[in-house]
Amino acid sequence: MPDARPRFPSRIGPYTVLTALDGDATSTVAERRCIARSGAGDRTVVLSLPPSGADHARWAAEAVTARDLALPGHVRITELGTSSDLPWYGVEYRPLLALPAILGAYGGPLPEHTVRALGASLASSLAMAHARGVAHGGLSPEAVLLGTEGPRVGCFGAARVAAPDGVVRSGIPWLNSVCLAPEQQSGGRPRPPGDVHALGAVIAYAATGRPAPETGDLPRSLRDPVSRCLSRDPAQRPRADHLAEDLAGATTAAPSATVLDVSAPIPLPGRVIAALARQSAALLAAEIRLDPRK
């Protein structure tokens, strides 16, 4: 399991850190994430902390907002530590990996039907947020966590954490520049069309294994929706609910994106499921080694 010691304190709140979730990629993710165990040994959680150099107050404010909104398809925050020295939030542990690690476990780009199902689920999650007047503002491959229970989105508000509106956001190491819409890079307020741009970049990455592929490198059925998502003109990008319906057409009989079950699992290749099982087994072994009674 990835060694968490160089990047995390041994204890965060009431939890003992077991391992880093993102391995060596921690410095390029909009949240530092680790898996930890309660002192009594009865709870295992994924903890998220601000990235290096981020404004702790803005990060904590976004975490509070994400907890209060409890958006479907997003990570469900169960507790918060809002100390200005080291704010953090926790979610219940389930075997999961960030999308880059999923591609690493599979050995390359995901199958087209898996990419379409993933895109439809993420688009539906964004659509429900947008219907409540909320922009996620932080979608990227690193923000997408996949397990057998379906995708969940973290890193809520990363663009807002990076800089307030009106301040240029380009060049920040932990903010994915490919996913950040042009209007947000120049300091524009995160809005729903920016989330759709980010989703287009995520779909392209999942389908090719590269952060900014040429349109011709995408599977034919994904070229048009991804191109529209990545339009430099926000007005030319599709709405998230329309995109969900488009992508779900080949994967579900649901008549409308508004009724897609974002909590439902998506089809994962066997190698990915095996990697999730290895994570769970390694975590159990780590917990046993840390148990003073053993």
Image (cartoon, rainbow, N blue to C red):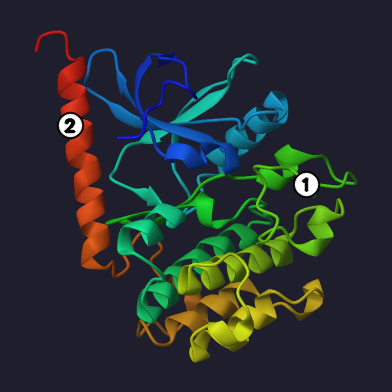
Query: Could you tell whether 223 is left or right of 173 in the image?
Result: left
Which label number is shown at residue 171? 1
Tag nearer the camera, 2 or 1: 1
Spot occupied by residue 76 in the image (x, y as percentages of width and height): 44, 42
In this picture, is 256 found above or below 138?
A: below
Spot occupied by residue 170 in the image (x, y as percentages of width and height): 80, 50
In this picture, is 15 found above or below 243?
A: above
Query: Could you tell whether 104 is left or right of 165 in the image?
Result: left
Q: Secondary structure at mark 1?
A: loop
**Three-letter residue code for mark 1:** Gly
Spot occupied by residue 43 in the image (x, y as percentages of width and height): 27, 25
Quarter in which the C terminus is drawn: top left
Q: Secondary structure at mark 2?
A: helix
Residue at coordinates 90% horizontally, 46% vertically from top-left? Answer: 166
Direction bottom: furthest residue: 220
Number of callouts in the render?
A: 2
**Three-letter residue code for mark 2:** Leu
Query: Is 281 or 191 nearer to us in this picture?
Result: 281
Which residue is the site of mark 2?
Answer: 284
Look at the numbered discs 2 and 1 and tell me whether their residues touch, using CB distance below 8 Å: no
Q: Quadrant of residue 61?
A: top right
Residue at coordinates 50% horizontally, 90% vertically from top-left? Answer: 221
Direction top: furthest residue: 292
Q: Is residue 238 visible?
A: no
Q: Quadrant of residue 185?
A: bottom right
Query: Could you tell whether 96 is left or right of 81 in the image?
Result: left
Mark with earlier residue (2, 1): 1
Label 2: few (<14), some (14–19) or many (≥20) C-alpha neighbours in 10 Å: few
Query: Is 246 or 254 nearer to us in this picture?
Result: 246
